[in-house]
Amino acid sequence: MAAYKGHRTNPDKFERGQIKIYLLILPMVLLTGLPIIFIIFHAFKPMEELFAFPPKFITLHPTFDNLLKLMKASISAGIPLSKYFFNSLFVTAAVVGGSLLFSTMAAYALSKLRFRGRNLMMQINQVALMFVSVAVMIPRYLVVNRLGMIDTYLAEILPLIALPVGLFLIKQFVDQVPDSLIDAAYMDGAVEWQIYLKIVIPMIRPAIATAAILVFQQVWTNLETSNYYVNDDSLKTLAFYMNTLTSTTTTNTVAGQGVAAAASLIMFLPNLILFCILQKNVMNTMAHSGIK
Amino acid sequence: MAEAALRKSTKVGKRMHSNPNGYAFVFPYALLFVIFILAPVVMAVILSFTNFNAIQWPKFVGFLNYINLITADDTFMKFVLPNTVKYALIVGVGGYILSFLLAWGLSNLTKAPRTVFALILYSPSMTTGVAMAVLWKIMFTGDQTGYLNSWLMNIGAINEPIIWLTNTNFLLPIVILIGLWSSMGVGFLSILAGLLNVDESLYEAAAIDGVKNRFQEMIYVTIPSMKPQMLFAAVMQIVGAFQNGTIATLLAGNPTPGYAAQLIVNHIEDYGFIRYEMGYAAAVSVVLLLIVQVFSSVSTKLFGEKD
């Protein structure tokens, strides 16, 4: 028996030994991917194929009917789709922007500046990685209510800005910025905000991209804020509207399924595209994600 | 030269000891953190000792809510708790092991297929809640036009369509399946990155020291050298599992038929926003936070670095 030599991760080229691994992984990948492919097919199915019996997986004659119906449905409900879309866009942009700004600032301070309470803050944030927001939706509602933010955009923005995972990942990445670089800048007379802007930010782009994805996912599909903090329909987000579509129409009508599938696709695609564009950064950031 | 070194050390030294700018940089995040994360958690703990209907001022009742939860809430004891434990073990722990195994497999492949596979495996976790509730509703439609029914009838496994989403036998397994499907999230990516960054010379050294196969290698070399990622992934996994528990009510309403798939998060929503017994709901919240805490201390025991 040949002596075991220790395997190599991240091989450069295909070897026969990888076939076993393909055989194990491919079924899982297919099973995972099927539902997503299904929703794409379904969103473009014409009426007669939605009604086809037995139901067909593949769409033979793709059409945009479902997307058009989706827009019409919202107009008959009194609020145009564009309004929900604008709300979502505005809320998402505000949350992602705010979260990235505040998290990078905090991460810089926690990683590179020395001050009292720093360690405690880091520990608290680390414990908060365990934070399950649905667990405290009631007291959260009470806080939002108390602050008089019910029925304002603020209620949809502020509660989602502080994301412990985002801060954690960015902070781990700032730790990689060499202190000597920052010391050199100090010697040249730079002050903190200059160091933050000109040295730290450009060096932690992968972590910022990763945090952006995570925050985006939190807010783009968030239902909690629209459901509980906002009563005025004209302030609610796309996620809320899409959810009303999927929860009311699909169970009753087959025709509604196509529309609901189109709605799901609209909710899902931005996530996917963003992740595809930024995936290299994500892996780079995750390399430093460990909790020590 | 010496002068420069001295100047450097004093400046840096001063900066290292106490820098009030630190507070300024932390302040915006800390403020929002305190208001929307810390305060709600503290309030949940306080409210859990009160009787509160959201209109009148809360009335202090001591441990009554917790006592009721354990002794008087049949739904909780008979359905919610067992469901939650099952769900947490399969989706939390099982999903975690699955994440690791898949990531390990991927780390043995070349870059291009690895990236594509990782993207596909990760993509369900982007679809939390709303985006994909409809998908499952279509799949599990209760008459013969439903995809699963049609397919099962076609291959002759069943004769009559099954009304999946109101059938108390199938609802929890469906929710668990969806949970597993979407459990290759941030934790999975973290593990994958960890695996790719294990120092390869460790494997060579271990082989010389007598490691004979890949399984031994995984246990003795791979996992110990990426403990921090394992811990991070474990925390992400368990939080994600509970956070996704709301899918049950999106599919079958709250309460779920016969409480078949009622998880602890749904129980909170039921009492808090449907019955307005917010003190009681808060007690359930605290229990949920404690469950998460237990899972993560076990993870810390397993993967935490002791020093």
Image (cartoon, helix red, strand yellow):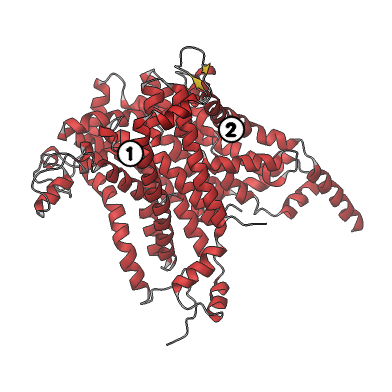
Residue beneath label 1, please?
A: B131
Badge 2: residue crowd in 10 Å (few <14, some 14–19, many ≥20): many
Side of B161 where B223 appears, left or right: right
Query: Among all residues in the image, which is located at the extreme front?
Result: B71
Residue beneath the point at 46% across and 54% down: B189
Residue beneath the point at 18% across and 47% down: B148
Residue beneath the point at 40% across and 65% down: B105
**Amino acid under disc 2:** Phe
User: Which labelled disc corresponds to residue B33?
Assistant: 2
The chain carrying label 2 is B
Earlier sequence position, callout 2 versus callout 1: 2
Residue beneath the point at 49% across and 52% down: B233
- Where does residue A158 sit, x and y in percent of width and height? 52, 28
Determine the CA span between mark 2 and mark 1: 27 Å
- From the viewer's perspective, is the residue at label 2 or at label 1 nearer? 2
Query: Among all residues in the image, which is located at the extreme bottom?
Result: A1
Whether residue A19 is situated above or below residue B273 in the rendered picture = below
Whether residue A92 is situated above or below residue B193 in the rendered picture = above
Residue nearest the viewer, comparing B267 with A42: B267
Q: Is mark 2 on a helix, strand or loop?
A: helix
The chain carrying label 1 is B
- Where does residue B53 sit, x and y in percent of width and height? 44, 16
**Amino acid under disc 1:** Ala
- Where does residue B2 sit, x and y in percent of width and height? 91, 58
Residue B19 sits in quarter = top right
> Looking at the image, how many numbered discs can be counted on the residues?
2
Residue nearest the viewer, comparing B18 with B153: B153
Residue A86 sits in quarter = top left
Side of A111 where B197 appears, left or right: left
